Image (tube, grey):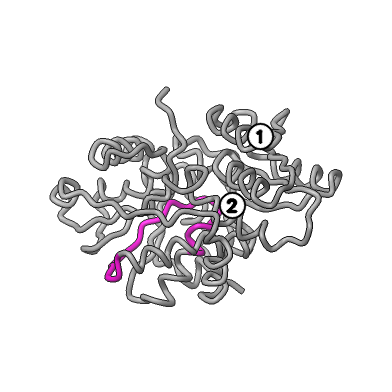
Amino acid sequence: MLTLETIQAAAARIHPYIHQTPVFTSQGLDRRFGKRLFFKGEHLQKTGSFKARGALNAALQLQNPKGLIAVSSGNHAQGVAYAAQVIGRPALIVMPQDASPLKKAATHAYGAEVYDQGVTVENREQVVRELAQELGYELIHPFDDLRVMAGQGTQALELLQQVPELDAVLVAVGGGGLISGIATVVKTLRPECAVIGVEPETANDAQQSLQVGTRIKLMGAPQTVADGVRTLVVGEHTFPVMQNHVDRILTVPDSVTLEAQGLMMSRLKQVVEPTAGLALGPLLMDYDLPQRVAVIVCGGNWLPA
């Protein structure tokens, strides 16, 4: 089970290999939105995103694996490549052919091999499982793995120490690993704090799933600038956690996501990727949000076109 205790154990396990990331504030953004905003800077984490946390927590619990294998459009790829480097094992990452060239190059830079021939968002899960069986490598799933979910939750332990009194946390949602870990910590230690997921309007499978009470799968790969959340369906392990601990899911159009990304870069002076802007998006819309809000800045692997 995913519990506060398993997340605390994950924090102790990965501590030597990660950064405790800072929290940023901006008086200008506070005035604009009439809120107190706190930006948890996971774009400054090892590999440029929070994904290193979950990948490390999973890899460090394996017993002498032959190698690591993962499927990812980018940030999890780098996290697993880094984790393989830490434990001294090879890594193979299955990435869609249309994944970010920047993220492919970064994955190579961490020493991993990238397999992308004929890989799409729709078939990547099948491809990675076939390769894992063929090679005998240990599969580290990007979100539907309790060890990964626990690792992602460790940033919430830091956040609640850095900003004890929060009214809400805004989190970008793809497969649900990030928000599951964060929500477990927040609802255990500060149950009155709302945990709010944010999805692109074109990729609202989590919102639909929570509304009807069963996992809804998108018909095809969603078109969105937030490339970190292009999953087709939330995970079997993440969904019940989301049902228990996530207060609501909001959606944002890509135009707002890009505006939010620009605001974060211009006001915080930090390079962030569009998926990180997604979490700020609800502040630019008419959603009713409380006063003291944390925004999870999930990644910074981006270069302007």
Give the residue at mark 2.
233
Residue 48: image location, x then y, percent: 48, 43
Q: Is residue 265 above or below residue 189?
A: above
Q: Is residue 176 magenta?
A: yes
Instruction: Determine whether, in the image, residue 67 is placed left or right of residue 190.
Output: right
**Element type where label 2 sits in the image:** loop
The number of numbered discs placed on residues in the rendered structure image is 2
**Element type where label 1 sits in the image:** loop
Quarter where residue 263 is shown: top left
- Please tell me which residue is depicted at 69% across the width and 63% down the height of the picture: 61
Please tell me how crowded label 1 is: few (under 14), some (14-19), or many (20+) other residues with Cα within 10 Å.
some
- Please tell me which residue is depicted at 69% across the width and 31% down the height of the picture: 116
Dividing the image into 4 quarters, which one contains the N terminus? bottom right
Residue 157: image location, x then y, percent: 43, 67
- Please tell me which residue is depicted at 45% across the width and 39% down the height of the picture: 226
- Please tell me which residue is depicted at 63% across the width and 47% down the height of the picture: 80
Front position in the image: 105 or 237:
105
Disc with the residue nearer the chain's start (1 vs 2) = 1
Q: What range is drawn magenta here?
A: 163-181
Instruction: Determine whether, in the image, residue 5 is placed left or right of residue 278.
Output: right
Please tell me how crowded label 2 is: few (under 14), some (14-19), or many (20+) other residues with Cα within 10 Å.
many
Give the residue at mark 1.
120
